[in-house]
Amino acid sequence: MTPVNKADKLSPDASEKGDLSMPAKVDMDKIVSLCKRRGLIFPSSEIYGGLASCWDYGPMGVELKRNVRDVWWKSIVHERADVVGLDTSIMMHPGVWTASGHIDSFTDPLVECKSCHLRWRADAVEGKGCPKCGGELTEPRMFNLMFKTSMGPVEEEASTVYLRPETAQGIFVNFDNVITTSRKKLPLGIAQIGKSFRNEITPGNFIFRTREFEHMELEYFVKPGTDEEWLDYWVKERFDWYVKLGIRKENLRLRQHGKDELAHYARDCYDVEYLFPMGWSELEGIANRGDFDLIQHAKHSGRELSYYDAEAGEKYVPYVIEPSAGVDRSLLAFLVDAYDEEEVGGEKRTVLHLHRSLAPIKVAVLPLSRNEKLTPLAKEVFNKLCPNFVTDYDDSQSIGRRYRRQDEIGTPFCVTIDFESLEDKQVTIRERDSLAQIRVPVEELGKILEAKLKGEAFDASPLWATREK
Ligand code: GAP
């Protein structure tokens, strides 16, 4: 267990225990090391020694993260007629957090060791003494997880505001704005993706639990009485979303919250759990928030927040079903599930079997060697592809090494240009998972790649030829 350090500079590997009843197949160190090596994720402010639990997304990580957001937005907003999007500010009127219950209830109990002065989460301490030195512990003190800052140019007159700990409240306070301007009927969802901040007592396990992270939240407003049905619907939708994006079913499970662990606003809640390297842990929560938030904001703001159902001729305060996921935590699950080490031609290869919609780079253009005769055609191919696909160009080191580099970041297709290409205007496409290679005319390359990236089987092509040895 890792203590809570007063200097607020926690060890990046502060433990989040998870349920260790089943071992995971890859340890976190390998994921962290791959992320550093291949420009996915770096420790924040690294040249200053880093800042605990803060991470920066590198050139490959930023693409992967965008893809996670985009596939969520596509499936939640663009592919549905009953959900609209929103983007609200991080700092909100302080009254929001009083109404939402975050000022009073968004707290964790902390105890402090009277000898070594380390702080611990009270509910994580087994026995009576300090887990480090055995010293006497203080009585638990409640610790609010919201970050405070001041707003206004003159410090003495500045007012205290909070960095939002969830994006959900920005949606609730805009409920009336959206209903009156979108002319949509219930059930209606409002979705938002954005940064949230929590002064977590035990951050750690890489990007699993951090103090600054990104939320993907949907508040789905329904007629009271239909809420349980909609909760079941969204639990299934969200579970299936991870499976569709390549996460193995056996690494996912659902867990209903016990009455004693429900958040202050929730009537019911399910967690989608994933078998992370530290054991089964929450990946996403899907809660039935009832009418808690709209009632609270109506009470505290003095504005009525209800819905007039013209068909039924009645007015009511909608209930809310909330699937709430983390961009970073989903990204970690996708990485862990995609990670594989295998032997190819007597050599070890590390590969990310990422779903093609998530892969940071879709196509890599690789001339067989850096040769003045090959370069013009290779550049021509790159220029043709890059307006339509995120494309990489790499002509350094041996072709085998370049394939391995692309495998490690999960690039689904490599296009190789060789000396024959100069004669027959054909190039080789090599697929990441099967290692199968097909030879196709440059003219048709874009069309073929587009079909393959949409999911067309690779070896079904009549041009199927060889497999990388
Ligand atoms: N609005 C409801 C809500 O925020 P939550 O269970 O606290 O519910 C939802 O958070 C999801 O957000 C979690 O399942 C996780 O994916 C992500 N999340 C929460 N706290 C996080 C943190 N400190 N670091 C990274 N992700 C976090």
Image (spheres, rainbow, N blue to C red):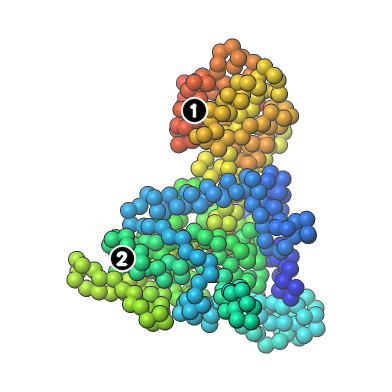
Measuring from the top left, give residue 276's x and y in whole percent.
Answer: 60, 57
Q: Which residue is mark 2?
A: 180
**x, y percent for residue 55:** 67, 57
3 lies left or right of 215 = right
Quarter of the image for the C terminus: give it. Answer: top right
Q: Taking the image as drawn, is residue 35 in sight?
A: yes
- Residue count near mark 1 (Cα–Cα under 10 Å), binned few <14, some 14–19, many ≥20: some
Tell me which residue sits at (60%, 81%) in the image: 157
Helix, strand or loop under label 2: helix
Taking depth in this image into account, of 9 and 299 the one nearest to the observer is 299
Above or below, 251 against 411 in this view is below
Quadrant of the picture in which ligand 1 is shown: bottom right
Give, as a three-letter code, the residue at label 2: Thr
Q: Position of residue 416 (x, y in %)?
A: 61, 25
- Camera-side residue of 194 and 459: 194
User: Residue 250: where, in percent of width, then height?
Assistant: 52, 52
Front residue (pair 119, 41): 41
Whether label 1 lies within 8 Å of ligand 1 gets the answer: no
Q: Residue at x 72, y 78 (%)?
A: 119
Q: Residue furthest front?
A: 154
Q: CA distance from mark 2 to mark 1?
A: 44 Å
Inspect this view and state whether residue 235 appears. no
Q: Amino acid at mark 1?
A: Gly
Of the numbered discs 2 and 1, the one sitting upstream in the chain is 2
User: Disc 1 marks which residue?
Assistant: 446
Left or right, 344 with reference to 391 = right
Q: Is residue 65 above or below residue 136?
A: above
Mark 2 Cα within 10 Å, few/some/many (few <14, many 20+)? few
**Residue 300 found in image quarter:** bottom left
Taking 283 as reference, is 116 left or right? right
